[in-house]
Image (tube, rainbow, N blue to C red):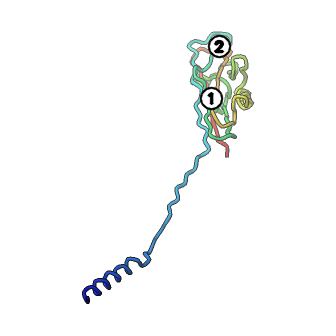
Amino acid sequence: MKKRILVIGTILSLAMVTASPLSVSAETTVISGTIANTAVLTAPSNITFTNFVVGTNTGSSTTPGSVVANASGWSLEVTDAKVESKGYMTRADGNNLSALIQVGMTSGSVTTISLYQAQLVADTAHGYGAAGTFTIPLYVSQLVGTGDLPGAYSITLTYTATPAS
């Protein structure tokens, strides 16, 4: 009987130890992220005139450019970064063609570089400044005069897309 009481006492004391409240510890981890306001730009493809002729020479980019934006409010700037002779096709020696290059969104709307930018900005019907994809067409017209010197001429248009702040 003493053994039975001793065994029952041991079992009860073990039950008391296991039944006592355990110490619980909890911590948290926060996972967060930010989506940056982006305006990803692809400039229109290059345009190469193989041989200029006296008179009007026209062409267009074979692949239009685009701006893909994840939020509205972005802007696009088109510039000729040259300090002198802005808007003119220029030879490596600094000589320019006599006429400004004309650029536009369509072959019938070619104008100066700054007015081309204004055409793009005004094109809200096709999504300028909105979230989504905006297409940037490029058509050019270059008048070559009889007094223009032979040689290779070029102009570099710089497109800059800026996401909304």
Residue beneath disc 1: 157
Quarter the N terminus occupies: bottom left
Q: Secondary structure at mark 1?
A: strand
Please give the name of the residue rendered at 55% of the width and 51% of the height, measured from the top-left corner: 33
Local crowd size for mark 1, using a 10 Å CA cut-off: few (<14), some (14–19), many (≥20): some
Query: In the rendered view, would you say 70 is above or below 103?
Result: below
Q: Is residue 6 above or below residue 27?
A: below
Give the CA separation, mark 2 to mark 1: 18 Å
Instruction: Give the side of residue 53 with respect to residue 19, left or right.
Output: right
Considering only order in the chain, which callout, 1 or 2, is on the residue closer to the N terminus? 2
- The image position of residue 92, as x and y in percent, is 57, 24
The amino acid type, in three-letter code, at marker 1 is Leu
Say whether residue 45 is left or right of residue 107: left
Establish if 9 lies above or below 93: below
Relative depth, front residue between 91 and 138: 138
Element under label 2?
Answer: strand
Residue 122, picture quadrant: top right
Circle on res. 53: none
How many residues crowd around disc 2 within 10 Å: few (fewer than 14), some, or many (20 or more)? some
Residue 54 position within the rendered picture, expressed as x and y whole percent measured from the top left: 66, 10
Image point 73% across, 22% down: which residue? Answer: 111
Return the residue nearer the eye: 13 or 114: 13
Q: Label 1 near label 2: C-beta < 8 Å?
A: no
Q: Quadrant of residue 86?
A: top right
Which residue is at the front of the view, 54 or 34? 34
The numbered mark at residue 57 is 2
